[in-house]
Image (spheres, rainbow, N blue to C red):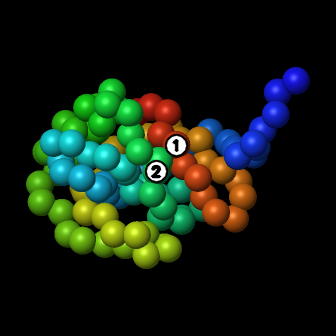
Amino acid sequence: MDYCLFQCHSETVDADVVGYTGTPQNPRVLAVRLPDGRRVMSQRLTPVLSAQARAHLKQSGPGRHARTDTGERYTTTAAGLVVEVEAGTTRHAVVTVSRVR
């Protein structure tokens, strides 16, 4: 029997990357805009996903500081990077990047 202990309800959606934490050479977390317009932070990126996001972030030039809807700080990036995420459907978004589009 499979038990869901932490996050039972999630859906896979495409999200626009609006920023990141870390450096352009080593992004740790992505700030994404979900289809409903909420800006939230993803879970920590795997090394493979971080490397895939790196090329876009380095090309987008210096960003500015911004905050998610809940006040978390991130550095903005140019539009154009889309990621597939698993987004929890509960009140508190838990967003995990599964791949870079």
In the image, residue 70 lies at what x, y percent? 50, 74
Label 2 CA crowd tier, 10 Å (few <14, some 14–19, many 20+)? many
User: What is the distance, in whole Å, between disc 2 and disc 1 at their CAs?
Assistant: 5 Å
Q: Locate residue 78, reporting x and y percent.
A: 24, 55
- Disc number for residue 42: 2
**Rendered residue at 37%/51% (across/down):** 30
Above or below, 1 relative to 34: above
Q: Position of residue 85 (x, y in %)?
A: 53, 41
Q: Which residue lies at the image location 47% right of the left edge and 47% below the top edge?
A: 43
Q: Nearer the viewer, residue 72 or 64?
A: 72
Dividing the picture into quadrants, the one containing residue 89 is bottom right
Local secondary structure at mark 2? loop
Do the residues under discs 2 and 1 have CB atoms within 8 angstroms?
yes
**Residue at the image point whose x is 54% and y is 49% from the top:** 95
- For marks 2 and 1 on the same chain, the one whose residue lies earlier in the sequence: 2
Where is residue 15 shown, x and y percent of the image? 48, 48
| Residue 14 seen | no
Q: Give the label on residue 96, or none.
A: 1
Q: Is residue 59 left or right of residue 47?
A: left
Looking at the picture, which amino acid does disc 1 mark? Answer: Thr
